[in-house]
Image (cartoon, grey):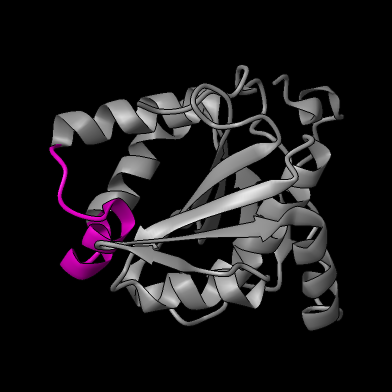
Amino acid sequence: MLLKFLFKPREPQFALGDDIKLRYLGPSDAEAFRTHIHELHFEDFRDRFNGLVSDYWLDKYIERSLAEAIVIGAFADNHLVAVAELHTGGRIAAGQGESAFSVASDWRHKGLGTMLLKVLLRAASENDVATIIVETGAQNQAMKALARRFGARMQFGGEQSTGRINVADGLRLAARKLENRNFPAPPFPVEETPAIAASLT
């Protein structure tokens, strides 16, 4: 699926309040992404990947995500503190996208997850993704609550929880819940655009 926003005019990054700026991430952001992941506390790292992963696996994951997926970063004073990802293609059914979120441990419970999911919903809508799949560990209460806030019905299987967010319904809920905070989709880094989205294996 060719990402439609590749053809939108590039604009400077924009500020969300006084503290946070959002923008799409590209391959040149790999080191910042890696640092962000390594700064997560043990429990948050485990929740993000539903277990532990090697540095080699993580480097390959970051490389492919930044090249193939929609990846949005939240920065505080130029430091990456949260990331939202949307993966499509490959084994993922047409019209669906698999999401992933990570929020720096010291920035949890400050609304960053809600902010990023709203932006991800808008990006999904603009790229013909009708359903966002949320997969998380059964112990990740914060992620399950966030998904439910935007209409997901979580199902449990073993140590996994899976939910699906209808993008149109999620955007309506976002507009109602956050009507006084309108976060437009962020622009791409200058001189970088992602390739056609594909799944990770």
Q: From the viewer's perspective, is residue 93 above or below residue 44?
A: above
Which residue shows up at 64% across the image and 67% down it? 115
Position of residue 180 relative to residue 183, above or below, is below
Q: Residue at x 85, y 68 (%)?
A: 172
Q: Position of residue 178 (x, y in %)?
A: 78, 78
Q: Is residue 92 left or right of residue 118?
A: left
87 relative to 178, above or below: above
Residue at the image point whose x is 54% and y is 31% from the top: 92
Q: Which residues are magenta?
A: 39-54
Residue 164: x %, y % from top left: 59, 57
Q: Is residue 49 magenta?
A: yes
Q: Is residue 186 magenta?
A: no
| Viewer-nearest residue: 170 or 116 | 170
Spot occupied by residue 152 in the image (x, y as percentages of width and height): 61, 67
Q: How many numbered discs, if any?
A: 0
Q: Is residue 144 left or right of residue 129?
A: left
Q: Quadrant of residue 161?
A: bottom left
Direction from residue 179 to residue 46 in the image, left or right: left
- Seen from the viewer's position, the closer of residues 43 and 34 is 43
Judging depth in this view, the residue of 194 and 74 nearest the camera is: 194
Residue drawn at 35 percent across, 75 percent down: 106
